[in-house]
Amino acid sequence: MVVSEQRAPEQRALTVSQLSEMVKLQLEELFQGVWVTGEIADFSRPASGHIYFTLKDPSAQIRCVIWRSTASRLRFQPKDGLQVICQGDMNVYAPRGNYQLVLRTMEPVGEGVQRLALRQLHARLSREGLFDPARKRPLPLFPRRIGLVTSPTGAAVRDFLEVARRRWQGLHILICPTRVQGDGAVDDIVKALASAQSVRPALDVIVVARGGGSIDDLACFNDERVVRAIHASPIPIVSAVGHEIDVTLCDLVADVRALTPTEAAERVVPSRDEVNEQLVAFRRRLAAAVTRRLNEVRLRLGAIANSRSFRRPYALVDDRTQLLDEYQQRARRAIDRCLRASRESWSQLGARLHALSPLATLRRGYSVTLRSDRTTMLKNADEINAGESIVTRLDQGWITSQVVSKESNRETDPS
């Protein structure tokens, strides 16, 4: 390898910082407001609020940044894999020698930013449960006070009032005027809903209505503030925005969705003719039920009237009286048997006791000697002293004697 001995003068050599600064000035001046399209990759959004990602195509990639002030104005949520078109300025970070694109605007490619933002808002509110069918409330059957949030000059108010008056009389319909499209419509709708909810006496139901239109015309009914205002309403709300093909977030969050203001009136206001038909049907069913019940009662009364108890009311008493007489006779016989058996048993016991009685011994000529108190029987002559009185119990009578002398007949012990 041959190294040239020629060297540039030191005064002509650039420092790295100088070279980087020259490149920075050239690139940033040359690439101002450049438009770039590509696919988002390595998307991140730290706590600072800035957005960092890589914009790439099949052959190259470039780092991009969106400062927080710009990111807050995006109308959709960027994510990996999304094809976008961006406008920004080239920026060189001299300390590392890296370049990046600082974006001013960004929009999705192939899908309008408004539709994408709407779809993302729908997904987020769905996760929060705002569209859950379980939270939807039924409409009152016979509302008396109805609030109508709509434009006072539009066709929606005329259609609703015409149908409501035709279907039922005596309704109190409060019109809460509001803009239903354009700038300021969102604030107007939110205020009109708040006004309708503050009316006293309270309204029975609130209808939010307007005619059909493009997605831009119906944008205010897809706004998050309007959706949350409907969700927070303590009064059931009917959404009648657009036509059948136009489904807004207000339609999804409302308790009932009507395709048109006319259908909203039909859903909210009962039909007088239909109610009359139902009343006639109820009256017929009630009359049939009463007639059927009367016939059943008549049959039961007839069966009771023909029963033995009603034909011979005292027969049961006579039968019970005869049965009581039989029970009395049987009881009397049973008592007599018990008494006879008891007498026989007591006679036998008396005979046995009499045979063992001391009185029977006295009848055979024996006697019993007792002390003068007639309670202590004498068995031994040693139990009495000469001069004491004794009493003798005979079979017939008593004898009182005085002991003159006594003699013991105790045998001498041979030992």
Image (cartoon, grey):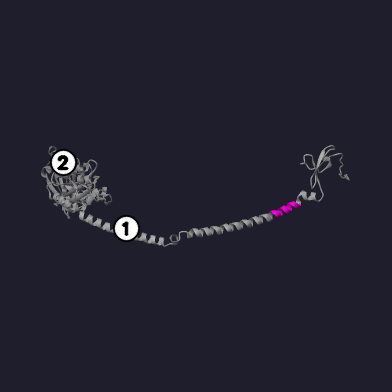
Q: Which of marks 2 and 1 is nearer the N terminus?
A: 2
Secondary structure under the numbered disc 2 in the rendered image: helix
Q: What residue type is labelled 1?
A: Val
Residue 298: say if magenta: no
- Looking at the image, can residue 157 be seen? yes
Q: Quadrant of residue 303?
A: bottom left
User: Which residue is tagged 2?
Assistant: 20
Q: In which quarter of the image is residue 301?
A: bottom left
Secondary structure under the numbered disc 1 in the rendered image: helix
| Residue nearer the viewer, 276 or 101 | 276
User: Which residue is tagged 1?
Assistant: 290
Query: Where is residue 352 drawn, in percent x and y?
Result: 73, 53
Q: Give the range drawn in magenta.
A: 346-355
| Residue nearer the viewer, 220 or 3 | 220
Cβ atoms at labels 2 and 1 below 8 Å apart: no
Q: What residue type is labelled 2?
A: Ser
How far, Cα to Cα, is label 2 from label 1? 102 Å
In this rendering, the label closer to the viewer, 2 or 1: 1
| Residue nearer the viewer, 59 or 83 | 83
Q: Is residue 358 left or right of residue 221?
A: right
Residue neighbourhood size for the residue with mark 1, other residues' Cα within 10 Å, grouped as few (<14), some (14–19), many (≥20): few
| Residue nearer the viewer, 216 or 258 | 258
